[in-house]
Image: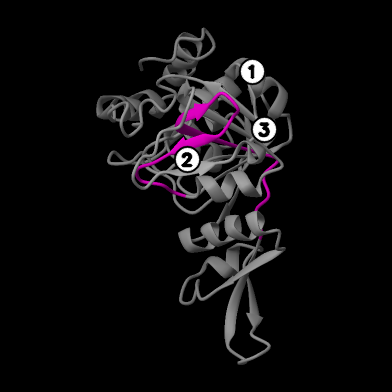
Amino acid sequence: MARIASLVDAVGELVRDGDMVALEGFTHLIPVAAGQEIIRQRKRDLTLVRMTPDIVYDQLIGAGCARKLIFSWGGNPGVGSLHRFRDAVQQAWPAALDIEEHSHAGMANRYVAGASGLPFAVLRGYVGTDLPTVTDTIKPITCPFTGERLTAVPAINPDVTVIHAQRADRTGNVQLWGLLGVQKEAVLAARRSLVTVEEIVDELTPVPGAIVLPAWAVTAVAEVPGGAHPSYAQGYSERDNAYYEAWDAISRDRDTFTRWLDEHVYTGTTETV
């Protein structure tokens, strides 16, 4: 059953050095505040998982939290490259970063397999790409019924999944709506889970298109208003486009990035860039 905790305590307890950690959210509801708390607590040797790593993963990688990234696309949405990610891959700064690249469909199916308690997923995919030649976790498989040649990918079961949502009630049931990604599957696939929310309420009122993660599927809930910033939380906040634009210049230079970490993360002040 989910418990209510502070973000500091939840990250300190649930995210451990060497863990596989998934921070999911698609376009909005990205758990940026939680990612920065992971940096602040100087977690190390993490295998980071995310379908679309963007600036919070750039920050985690640049801060030296990661040893490996499992993903299907990476970039600063609408702006360009992730420069701390590039520096880690190309120059091993601040440390070497292993990468495991999949397609979106492959990553989504891996989460579904993990949530379903299955060892792998099967899909029609990767045909005509070079990914099977460079990614060891993509394997051909033959259907035992039709003889069709398909592709198998292993389940993803994170040690901890972190997501952001709009609301939770006081018993830990979580409600989220809007443009959804694989948050539900990522939570159900994980051994532990942390959900940051805009607010904790007495009762979850119905919202069209909303889904509810039951309290039994969540380890901890932390109330963190604005916890998705600079991404948006539908019904609560808008996307901070200026932040994404400013990040490009900050992340290009190691010294500028390091100063930004000192001023805006390690001090606990994360509202601006």
Q: Nearer the viewer, mark 2 or mark 3?
A: 3
Q: Residue 266: x, y in percent?
A: 54, 11
**Mark 3 secondary-structure assignment:** loop
- Local packing at callout 1 (Cα closer than 10 Å; few below 14, some 14-19, many 20+) is some
Instruction: Tell me whether circle 3 and circle 1 mark residues in contact (CB < 8 Å).
Output: no
Depth order, front residue of 202/256: 202
Tell me residue 187's x, y (percent).
Answer: 60, 43
Badge 1 is on which residue?
Answer: 41
Q: Which residues are magenta?
A: 155-181
Q: Which residue is at 39% across, 39% downward?
A: 206
Classify mark 1: helix, strand or loop: loop
Report how far apart the C-alphas of labels 2 and 3 lie in the structure. Answer: 34 Å
Q: Of discs 3 and 1, which sits in the foreground?
A: 3
Residue plotted at (53% across, 27% down): 35
* 1 and 2 marks in contact (CB < 8 Å): no
- Of the 4 image quadrants, the one containing the N terminus is top right
What residue is disc 3 on? Answer: 219
Residue type marked 3 = Thr
Q: Which residue is mark 2?
A: 86
Q: Amino acid at mark 1?
A: Gln
